[in-house]
Image (cartoon, helix red, strand yellow):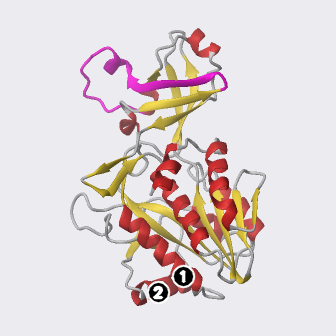
Amino acid sequence: MDLLEKLTNIFGVSGNEENIREMIKDEIKNYVDEVSVDKLGNLIARKKGEAPKVMLAAHMDEIGLVIKSIERGGKIYCSPVGGIEAITLLGERVHIETKKGIIHGIITTREISDGIYTTKLPKMENLIVDTGLSKRGLKRMDVEVGTYLSLEQEPCFLGSENIICGKALDNRIGCYVLIELAKRLKKIKNEIYYVFTVQEEMGLFGAITSAYIVEPEWALAVDVSETCDSTGEITKTIGKGPCLTIKDADMIANKCLNDWIRNIAKKKKIPLQLDVSDLGTTDAVSISISRGGVPSSVVSVPVRNLHTATAVAHKKDIENTIKLLEELLKNPPLVCLR
């Protein structure tokens, strides 16, 4: 899993994915026939072959912040990039990369900074970033309105080396899965597009343009999903296998494709959790309505603490996701209509 750690350590907030894109390009280029970048910034890696033409999409962007204003004393106010709860950001470190160097900062509030006891939950507009520099000092480092701030968190293990914790698991896990599949499926006959999309966290935008270019017979988004295991009845949890989306907040997955995946999981004895959710969606919804429509579904890895810098996932779920998709692509459906 060294590659996954390497992927999570790269910074790539939505709209600022250049570094993670270059890293993924270097990792996958030897296992595919063509690598290109479209006008929006998606990385499209093509393995040539016969029908069916399949698209696997994993978004490479992560949640983060962008500077909205800087006070005279140097305190920074930010706008969120992606869906972030303000309370999860308190005390987090940020990484600001400029042409003149790297700056670190801490997310806090005025009250916490001054040691004042507070009982109110913070809102995004209450959060400030303290870099230790004045406004003039920040300007000298080329920090200005529009500069990106990435969450900074070293990956670690919880309890055992099977349970990993860190930033950007959403969705560097999906990127890792696609790279590993490219390594294993270099010699299969059918055509596969491994697509690493941009700006998923801001509106699923990268999936729209990339699917229009690829025109796949069918597609899968490879992503992560929230868990339901902290209270009450456990319906999705880490360590019990990948999740297959039946329905999320914005789409109903293709039944034919889902049936094919479920049959493979049963035949190969791969654990699979069925996912019906009222929250969130993935690149699959944008892909599914591209051009004349694309049969689409989602295979995801369950993750606790989603959209935080301390997300938690189980290695066995990631390994079983790779195994499931490898078997699917070795024996893919030629057509999957509704």
In which quarter of the view is residue 317 placed? bottom left
Residue at 50%, 9% in the rendered image: 73
Residue to which mark 2 is pinned: 264
Quarter of the image with the C terminus is bottom right
- At numbered mark 2, what does the secondary structure look like: helix, strand or loop? helix
Query: Pointers 2 and 1 in contact (CB under 8 A)?
Result: yes
Crowding at label 2, few (<14), some or many (≥20) Cα neighbours within 10 Å? some
- Amino acid bearing label 2: Ile
- At numbered mark 1, what does the secondary structure look like: helix, strand or loop? helix
In the image, taking residue 131 as reference, residue 137 lies left or right, namely right
Return the x and y of residue 34 as percentages of the image width and height: 76, 65
In the image, taking residue 312 as reference, residue 222 lies left or right, namely right
Going from N to C along the chain, the mark reached first, 2 or 1, is: 2
Q: Which residues are magenta?
A: 99-123
Residue to which mark 1 is pinned: 328
Residue at 24%, 20% in the rendered image: 117
- Residue 127 at least partly seen: no
